[in-house]
Image: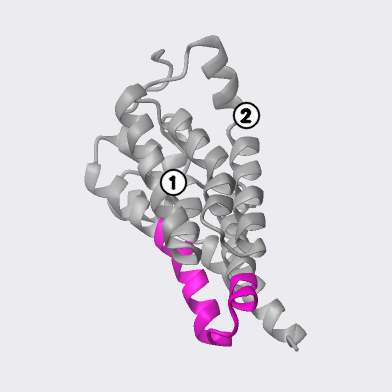
C-alpha cells in the first residue's frame, strides 16, 4: 500500500526540480541579462538560441530535459522498482510534477516555458522507447519543416499513440496524453501563427515568417 507521504514527496520534489529555470540561469551567468527580454520571451532552448549562443542553448536543452528525467529517476530511487504498474505510477507522478514545475515555476512567479525539452526528458526516463520515438519525430519534422513548434506539437500528439502501440502501462499512457495536452495549451500562440503562416523557422529571428 502506497504511503501518502511518498506521493506528496514525489509531487513536491518533482515540481521543485522542474521549476529550475536553466535558460534564465545560463543566460544570466553568461552576462546576457534576462532571456525573458529576448525574442519570444520564452525561457527554453529555442529562444536562448536567438542570443547567438549555441552553447547556452545546449545547456538549457540538456538542463530542461535532464530535470524531467531526474524527477523520474529520483522517484525510482525513493520507492524502488516495484511491480511495473506501481513503478509506472510513481514515475508518472514525479515526471508530471516536474513538467508542471517547468510550465509554472515558483521561482519565476509561475510564468515558465513551453516544456518541450522537459516533456522529452520525462518520457525518455519513464518509457525510453516512447521517448526515443518522440525525439525521432521531432528531429524528422524539424529537418523537413524547420519549425520548432510544429515539430514539438507533432511529437506530443503522437506520444500517447506510441505509448499504446508499445503496450506501456496505463499510467504511462495517461502521462503522455496529459503532457501532450499541456504542450498544445502552451503552444496556442504558435498554433495561431502556424495557421496564419507566420511562425518563424528554427534559427530565424522573431517575426520572420516560415
Q: Which colour style is shown?
A: one colour
In the rendered image, which residue does mark 1 sit on? Answer: 134
Instruction: Please report the residue visible at 75 percent of the width from the left and 89 percent of the height from the top.
Output: 1
The crowding category of the residue bearing disc 1, from other C-alpha atoms within 10 Å (few below 14, some 14 to 19, many at least 20), is many
Quadrant assignment, res 186: top right
Label 2 or label 1, whichever lies nearer to me, is 1
Quadrant assignment, res 143: top left
In the figure, 68 relative to 151: above or below? below
The crowding category of the residue bearing disc 2, from other C-alpha atoms within 10 Å (few below 14, some 14 to 19, many at least 20), is few
Quadrant assignment, res 205: top left
Question: Which secondary structure is most common in the magenta stretch?
Answer: helix
Instruction: Please report the residue visible at 48 percent of the width from the left and 40 percent of the height from the top.
Output: 155
Magenta segment range? 65-89
Horizontal relation, residue 181 to residue 56: left or right = right
Q: Is residue 106 visible?
A: yes
- In terms of depth relative to the viewer, which is nearer, 187 or 171? 171
Is 72 in the magenta? yes
Is 30 in the magenta? no
Q: Position of residue 34 (x, y in %)?
A: 42, 44
Mark 2 vs mark 1: which is more N-terminal? 1
Q: Disc 2 on helix, strand or loop?
A: helix
In the figure, 103 relative to 139: above or below? below
Q: Position of residue 94 (x, y in %)?
A: 60, 69
- In terms of depth relative to the viewer, which is nearer, 84 or 190? 84
- In terms of depth relative to the viewer, which is nearer, 39 or 152? 152
In the figure, 202 relative to 168: above or below? above
Q: Disc 1 on helix, strand or loop?
A: helix
Horizontal relation, residue 2 to residue 120: left or right = right
In the rendered image, which residue does mark 2 sit on? Answer: 188
Horizontal relation, residue 63 to residue 171: left or right = left
Amino acid at each position: 500500500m502506497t504511503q501518502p507521504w511518498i506521493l506528496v514527496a514525489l509531487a513536491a520534489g518533482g515540481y521543485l526540480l522542474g521549476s529550475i529555470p536553466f535558460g534564465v540561469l545560463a543566460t544570466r551567468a553568461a552576462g546576457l541579462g534576462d532571456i525573458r527580454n529576448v525574442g519570444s520571451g520564452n525561457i527554453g532552448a529555442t529562444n536562448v538560441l536567438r542570443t547567438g549562443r549555441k552553447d547556452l542553448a545546449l545547456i538549457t536543452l540538456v538542463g530542461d530535459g535532464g530535470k524531467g528525467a531526474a524527477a523520474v529517476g529520483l522517484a525510482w530511487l525513493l520507492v524502488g522498482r516495484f511491480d511495473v504498474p506501481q513503478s509506472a505510477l510513481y514515475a508518472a507522478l514525479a515526471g508530471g510534477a516536474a513538467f508542471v514545475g517547468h510550465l509554472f515555476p515558483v521561482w519565476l512567479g509561475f510564468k515558465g516555458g513551453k516544456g518541450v525539452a522537459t516533456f522529452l526528458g520525462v518520457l525518455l526516463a519513464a518509457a525510453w522507447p516512447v521517448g526515443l520515438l518522440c525525439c525521432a519525430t521531432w528531429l524528422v519534422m524539424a529537418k523537413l519543416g524547420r519549425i520548432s513548434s510544429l515539430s514539438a506539437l507533432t511529437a506530443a500528439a503522437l506520444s500517447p499513440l506510441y505509448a499504446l502501440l508499445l503496450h506501456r502501462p496505463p499510467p504511462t499512457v495517461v502521462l503522455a496524453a496529459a503532457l501532450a495536452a499541456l504542450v498544445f495549451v502552451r503552444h496556442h500562440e504558435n498554433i495561431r501563427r502556424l495557421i496564419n503562416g507566420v511562425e518563424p523557422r528554427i534559427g530565424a529571428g522573431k517575426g520572420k515568417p516560415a
